Image (cartoon, grey):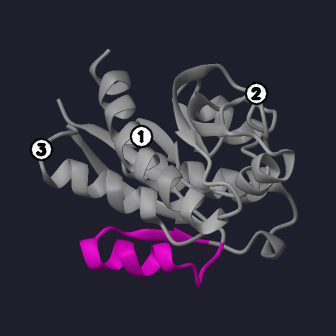
């Protein structure tokens, strides 16, 4: 049975594209029903349009509270029978409204070996600390920032003094690890 998912993203959407391409190759039995973004001008919107996937975009400042915009998102997700929320560079903490509507069905990918370097700019944090190995973590989402139970991890060697090359290595690993991990989760 095909798993119906929504991908949440705030940026370029490279992980969204990797997931969609994995679906198209028949490696992941899922369908992206909706892309949700808090940045209406984010490049992920163009990527979604190229694949013909509908987008729900919103500007948080247009709402009185997180619960208000999350309620609207839940309505949109339920309208499309979404079963899982897949965060892919979504730069907002998920609140109680979404977590309650999708218990244990919200996952995230983070560019570090959690619990090290949670939050924003994990790659910069790792490089500032001089670590030789960083990585990628897929985890369940809870109320905290990158604190949910870990599902999968992969190590990535840091290219000393070269953030761009390190980021590229991390993206390559993310684009492999996330679809494989989602496949395992959806087949349970």
Q: Report x, y in % for residue 116.
A: 77, 32
Give the crowd class for mark 3: few <14, some 14-19, many >=20 residues within 10 Å. Answer: few
In the rendered view, does 73 fall on the left or right side of 168? right
Between residue 175 and residue 124, name the one nearer to us.
Answer: 124
Q: CA distance from mark 1 to mark 3?
A: 15 Å
Q: CA distance from mark 1 to mark 2?
A: 18 Å
Looking at marks 1 and 3 on the same chain, the residue that comes earlier in the sequence is marked by 3
Q: Report x, y in % for residue 177.
A: 40, 37
The residue at which mark 1 appears reads as 178
Q: Residue at x 41, y 81 (%)?
A: 46
- Count of residue discs: 3
Q: Residue at x 65, y 72 (%)?
A: 58
Vertical relation: 59 (above or below) 79: below
SS class of the residue under badge 1?
Answer: helix
The residue at which mark 3 appears reads as 26
Looking at marks 1 and 2 on the same chain, the residue that comes earlier in the sequence is marked by 2
Q: Is residue 45 magenta?
A: yes
Mark seen at residue 115: 2
């Amino acid at each position: 049975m095909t798993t119906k998912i929504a991908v949440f993203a705030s940026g370029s959407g490279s992980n969204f594209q990797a997931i969609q391409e994995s679906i198209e190759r028949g490696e992941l039995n899922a369908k992206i029903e909706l892309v949700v973004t808090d940045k209406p001008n984010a490049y992920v919107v163009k990527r979604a349009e190229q694949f013909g996937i509908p987008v729900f975009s919103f500007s948080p400042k247009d709402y009185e509270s997180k619960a208000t915009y999350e309620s609207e998102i839940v309505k949109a997700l339920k309208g499309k029978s979404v079963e899982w929320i897949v965060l892919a560079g979504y730069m907002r903490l998920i609140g109680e409204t979404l977590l309650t509507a999708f218990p244990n069905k919200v996952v995230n990918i983070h560019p570090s070996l959690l619990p090290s370097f949670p939050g924003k700019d994990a790659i910069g944090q790792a490089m500032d600390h001089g670590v030789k190995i960083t990585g990628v973590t897929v985890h369940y989402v809870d109320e905290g920032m990158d604190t949910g139970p870990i599902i999968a991890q992969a190590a990535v060697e840091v290219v000393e003094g070269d953030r761009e090359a390190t980021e590229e290595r991390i993206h390559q690993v993310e684009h492999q690890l996330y679809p494989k991990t989602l496949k395992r989760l959806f087949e349970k």
